[in-house]
Each structure stands twice: as C-alpha cells, then as structure tokens.
Image: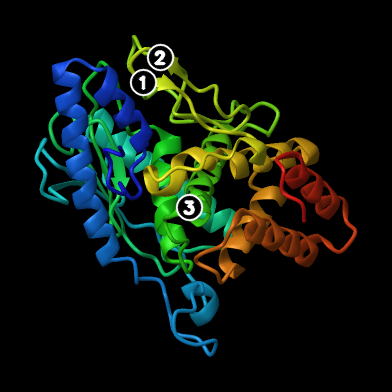
C-alpha cells in the first residue's frame, strides 16, 4: 500500500519514506509519517498555483505554452532574492532576514540559500536569457529553518522551503543542486507545466535534476567529464550508506542503506517501474531521461549548459504537451537540436543515439 499521497515537488522521494516506515524504529516511523502529512499539504498548495504560467492560445482551452514565448521576455534581468527564517515553524514565508544586496548574515543556511539562488538565477539569465523563475523577474522567495528537524525541501508553487534535517538521516537541504532543482520546478510550472503523474511527472523531475546538476557544474567550473552527476550530494546523514539522492551517471547506485533501502532508479526502459506509488514513480523513472541527458553530454563534451542544456531548455519551452511521454520529450529534443544545430548535425545524431541507449527510439 502506498503511504504517500502525491508529495509534489519535494526533494526527498516518497519511496524513501515508504522504506523508512517499514524499516525504521518508532521515532523514524513517526518522522516519516509526519513528512507524508506535510507533503499532502504541499501538494494542495502546489495544486492551487498550478495554473500560473499558463496563457490562453489559439490552440484552444487546456493548451499549455511558455509565458515567455507567448508574451515576450522582459528586457532587463534583475535578481530579487528574499530569504526568510522560518524559525522552525510551519508558517511560510517567515521573517525576512536577507534581501537582494544585503550583506551575509552569518547564518550558514540563510547565506547558502541566498548564494545558491544567485547561481540559479545567473544560469538561467546568462545562458538561457530567462529572467528569473517566470521569465519576468519573479522574486526568488526562500525559507530556511522550515519546521523543526524537517527532513525535506520543496517548491510549493510560489516559493522554496528547506528543512535543516535531523542530523542523522539528513543533515542539510541548502545544497546547490537541491536549490536549483526546486527553483527549476518553478521554471517548469511557468513554462507550461508537465503534469505530475507518470512519464510527464518523471520528465518534470528529470528537468529539475538536469538543471540542478547543471547549476552545480557551472558554479564549480566543471565540464561534463569532471562532474560527478550527483543530485543532493552531501545531504545524507553521516551514518547513511550513500553519496546522494540520485546519480544521473549511474541511476540506481546513489545509495544502498539498511534504513533507506536501495536506490530504485532505472537507467533503461527495460527496467521501467510500473507503480501506483509516487504518482506513478515520478522520482524513480526520472532516472531514464536523466541518464539520456548524461550520455548525450558524454558524446558532446564541453559544458552541460551549452549545447545539451540549450536543447533541453528549448524543448521545455516548446513541448506544448503537459501529458508528454518520454517518447514525446525525446522527439521534442530532437526537433530542438535540428532547430539549433541543423538536420544531420553531430548534435542531432548523437542525441538520437543517447535516447536509443536508454531504450527510446526517435
């Protein structure tokens, strides 16, 4: 029985909570159950905002398009970061403790959230000509110290929130790939959206992982061969047997722990997980498009935010299908590669090969 009810856009996947409910002691089970209840609340908040970023088009009702494409992006890009202290309470956003241009506070969580949001803003602005989350300079609102010992981070449709972790299972959530992952869920929302169910939901998660890893690599000046391709590196507790939440290089190998279980992500369609849990396995099957992006980067070399990233970003802006399957997404990336680099280009041919290697023919 699935113990989780659609924890939309939380970084810790529900299959981890399911395993903790089965394997943990009384305190761990209580913690996991509490996380599930909070996730339900996040889901409801997120659903209330799911229409933002969608504009009507001539294609008819229910057609999703990027606001930036439909209305035109703003000329000037201005970063507006607002970091709040939740003071271990549930209310959002909490007390504003650092605004744009303010000096460092000395609170590591506050300052990491501020700096991380700047890295994400710069990636989207400088490499993809996108002005913040919505393309129009939306303030980047974040809350740190959310709830007491809270083992998660999420995007709720309007802002990010990060727990401090309990110091045992998780120890921080203001890690750059996590920050970029959550902000990128907002980018998906304001680019027409990918319904958080089944393959479209896994694509939503994968896009957030891709841009989380990309932000980390750009911040550290790493090319695709130097990068470790981990998402959530360093957030696991000191006694947890694992290196991250997910590995794009080798899905299924990020952790193997007595409490958290074995990383269940597949790397190929032959191992696609059919499940009713986790909205049809959105955090699990995202390993397949994640691995396709990794393989593509290995073929092209250089920086992930250059040719591969440009193709993925353009595909998101033009997919115009909130129920997109992996095959739909792969075909859209192929179209983007042709538009950007030409039919018969090396970029196009290697992209087709990368998708074929994970079991998706285009």
Q: Mark 2 points at which residue?
A: 257
User: Residue 66's spot in the image, x, y percent?
Assistant: 50, 72
Please state which of the two labelled residues, at mark 2 or mark 3, is closer to the viewer.
3
Identify which residue, 53 or 108, lies in the foreground.
53
Residue 25 image point, x, y percent: 19, 15
Marked residue nearer the N-terminal end (2 or 3): 3
Q: What secondary structure is found at the residue carrying circle 1?
A: loop
Q: Distance between the residues labelled 1 and 3?
A: 23 Å
Q: Name the residue under label 3.
A: 198
Whether residue 58 is situated above or below residue 311 in the rendered picture = below
- Which label sits on residue 260? 1
How far is disc 2 from disc 3 in space, using C-alphas? 26 Å
Question: Neighbour class for label 1 at 10 Å: few (<14), some, many (≥20)?
Answer: many
At x 15%, y 51%, the residue is: 92
Residue 316: % across, % down: 57, 62
Q: Residue at x 63, y 55 (%)?
A: 312
Can residue 12 be seen here? The reply is no
Q: Do the residues labelled 2 and 1 touch (CB within 8 Å)?
A: yes
Horizontal side, residue 72 vs residue 164: left or right: right
Q: Which of marks 1 and 3 is nearer the N terminus?
A: 3
């Amino acid at each position: 029985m699935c113990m989780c009810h659609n924890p939309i856009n939380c970084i810790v996947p529900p299959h981890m909570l399911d395993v903790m409910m089965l394997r943990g002691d009384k305190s761990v089970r209580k913690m996991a159950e509490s996380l599930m209840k909070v996730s339900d609340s996040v889901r409801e908040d997120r659903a209330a905002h799911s229409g933002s970023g969608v504009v009507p088009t001539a294609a008819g009702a229910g057609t999703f398009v990027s606001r930036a494409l439909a209305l035109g992006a703003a000329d000037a890009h201005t970063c507006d970061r607002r970091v709040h202290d939740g003071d271990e309470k549930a209310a959002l956003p909490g007390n504003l403790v650092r605004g744009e241009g303010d000096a460092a506070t000395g609170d590591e969580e506050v300052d990491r959230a501020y700096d991380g949001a700047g890295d994400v803003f710069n990636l989207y602005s400088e490499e993809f000509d996108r002005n913040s989350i919505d393309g129009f300079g939306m303030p980047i609102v974040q809350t740190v110290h959310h709830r007491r010992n809270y083992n998660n981070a999420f995007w709720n449709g309007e802002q990010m929130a990060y727990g401090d972790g309990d110091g045992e299972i998780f120890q921080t959530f203001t890690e750059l790939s996590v920050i970029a992952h959550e902000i990128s869920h907002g980018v998906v929302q304001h680019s027409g959206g990918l319904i958080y169910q089944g393959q479209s939901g896994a694509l939503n998660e994968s896009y957030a992982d891709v841009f989380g890893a990309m932000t980390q690599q750009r911040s550290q000046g790493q090319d695709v061969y130097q990068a470790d391709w981990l998402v959530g590196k360093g957030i696991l507790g000191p006694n947890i047997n694992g290196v991250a939440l997910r590995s794009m290089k080798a899905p299924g190998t990020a952790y193997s722990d007595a409490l958290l279980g074995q990383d269940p992500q597949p790397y190929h369609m032959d191992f696609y997980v059919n499940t009713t849990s986790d909205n049809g396995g959105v955090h699990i099957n995202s390993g397949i498009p994640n691995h396709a992006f990794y393989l593509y980067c290995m073929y092209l070399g250089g920086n992930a935010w250059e040719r591969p990233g440009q193709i993925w970003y353009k595909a998101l802006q033009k997919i115009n299908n909130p129920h997109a399957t992996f095959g739909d997404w792969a075909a859209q990336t192929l179209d983007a590669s042709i538009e950007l680099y030409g039919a018969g280009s090396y970029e196009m041919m290697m992209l087709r090969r990368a998708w074929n290697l994970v079991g998706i023919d285009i």
